[in-house]
Amino acid sequence: MSVLILALVAGAVLGLALGALGGGGSVLAVPALIYLLGFSPAAATTASLIIVTATSATALYAHAVAGHVRWKAGAAFAAAGIVPAAMAGAAAARLPQSVLTAAFAGIAALAAIRMLGPAPSAAATGQVRPVKAAGTGAGLGALTGLLGVGGGFLAVPALVTVLAFEMQAAIGTSLLVITTNSLASLMTRSGGAAGIDWAVMAPFTGAAILGAWDGKRLAAKVSGPLLQRLFAAVLLAVAAFMLFDVFFV
């Protein structure tokens, strides 16, 4: 299978997941770029941020049109992660590639476990804690900057449990958080773009953007829990493969 076809297929799957679930799809970008398209871990995390930014912004527009984005609360939540995202993005360039790969595998496994667990229940109205919300937003920003993932698989349950959002609003608003954090991290990674093969990146990103629109429609037709379980199984397999590659190959 040619590299171009692999890029198109991987991008479409990522976009579908991101559009349907509001997070988690970006976790596939880094392993796809490393193992299918031959990117180094450092280049893959930078490329992933570019893909995630473009795809999340597209999915954000679709959810905003549907009225599922809470702009004021989402902007405040995202603002807490801007500085951590930028700092972590700068630090990522100094870490060994094996460390980045192992850390990413751990995050992929965590994402899968969270998806397989019960859906988060909303906090009672009036119990929103600003300090906890800011801390959660900062943590998500650091995760985005370090590993090139949007962090939506953590943002969605955080928005439900910490800010008492209903699920649809949490999914839509998480895309605002993902887009903001990804842009902040990219600002510190300008040098990392030098190792990116744009002939591969362009079709990957284009397919992901189109997939995000299809994912939004898919979410309205297929059971959310079923989508999460299928995607979680894929993530667990990816995490196991990456850990095996780091420690045994």
Image (cartoon, helix red, strand yellow):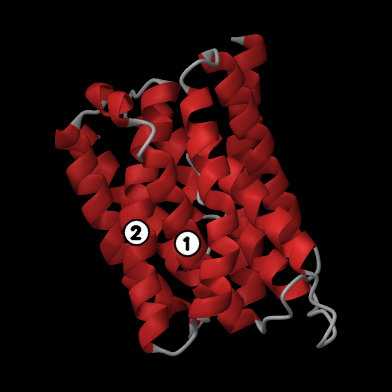
Residue 23, image x, y percentages = 54, 60
* Residue drawn at the location 48% of the way across and 51% of the way down: 181
* Residue drawn at the location 67% of the way across and 47% of the way down: 139
Q: Amino acid at mark 2?
A: Thr
Residue 108, image x, y percentages = 63, 42
Q: Amino acid at mark 1?
A: Ala
Q: Which mark is residue 55?
A: 2
Give above or below for 69 relative to 244.
below
Residue 60, image x, y percentages = 39, 72
- Looking at this view, is 128 or 243 the one in front? 128
Q: Which mark is residue 193?
A: none
* Residue 241 picture quarter: top right
Q: Is residue 119 visible?
A: no
* Residue drawn at the location 58% of the way across and 37% of the way down: 238
Left or right, residue 111 beside residue 162: left
Viewer-nearest of discs 1 and 2: 2
* Residue 154 picture quarter: bottom right
- Looking at this view, is 11 or 41 the one in front? 41
- Looking at this view, is 8 or 173 the one in front? 173
Residue 172, image x, y percentages = 50, 75
The secondary element bearing badge 2 is classed as helix
Give above or below for 149 relative to 169.
above
Q: Which mark is residue 17?
A: 1
* Residue 213 picture quarter: bottom left
Cα distance between the residues tagged 1 and 2: 11 Å
